[in-house]
């Protein structure tokens, strides 16, 4: 069985998702209105939502259930 390639992330998941969302929005702005543009904008919103959820889950105010 081959060894897994492992590498250390230099950015947090929140940062990576925010960069991805920004790139997707830039791509969408270059396209004419249509289905492809809407799909890119939807992916950007999903990336932003994922980033916010991850921040919320990591927040110190979040308490584990008792």
Image (cartoon, rainbow, N blue to C red):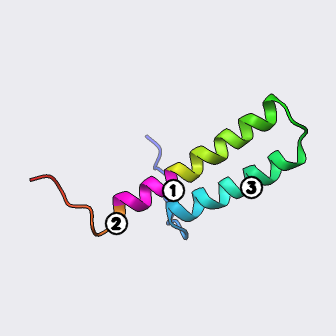
From this view, report whether residue 26 is shown above or below residue 61: above
Name the mark on residue 59: 2
Name the residue tied to disc 1: 51
Question: Residue 14 location, x and y as percent?
Answer: 52, 61
Secondary element at image label 1: helix
At 35% from the left edge and 63% from the top edge, which residue is drawn?
A: 58
Secondary element at image label 2: loop
61 sits to left or right of 43: left
Name the residue tied to disc 3: 23
The Cα atoms of the two marked residues, 3 and 1, are separated by: 14 Å
Kindly tell me whether residue 45 is visible in this rendering: yes
Kindly tell me whether residue 5 is visible in this rendering: no
Secondary element at image label 3: helix
Quadrant position of residue 18: bottom right
Residue sitting farthest toward the left: 66
At 74% from the left edge and 55% from the top edge, which residue is drawn?
A: 23
Which sits earlier in the primary sequence, circle 2 or circle 1?
1
**Closer-to-camera residue (10/47):** 47
Q: Which residues are magenta?
A: 50-57
Which sits earlier in the primary sequence, circle 3 or circle 1?
3
Q: Are marks 2 and 3 in contact (CB under 8 Å)?
A: no
């Amino acid at each position: 069985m081959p060894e897994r390639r492992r590498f250390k992330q230099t950015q947090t998941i929140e940062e990576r998702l925010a960069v991805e969302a920004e790139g997707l929005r830039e791509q969408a702005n270059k396209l004419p209105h249509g289905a492809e543009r809407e799909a890119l904008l939807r992916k950007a919103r999903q990336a932003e939502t994922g980033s916010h959820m991850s921040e919320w889950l990591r927040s110190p105010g979040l308490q584990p259930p008792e």
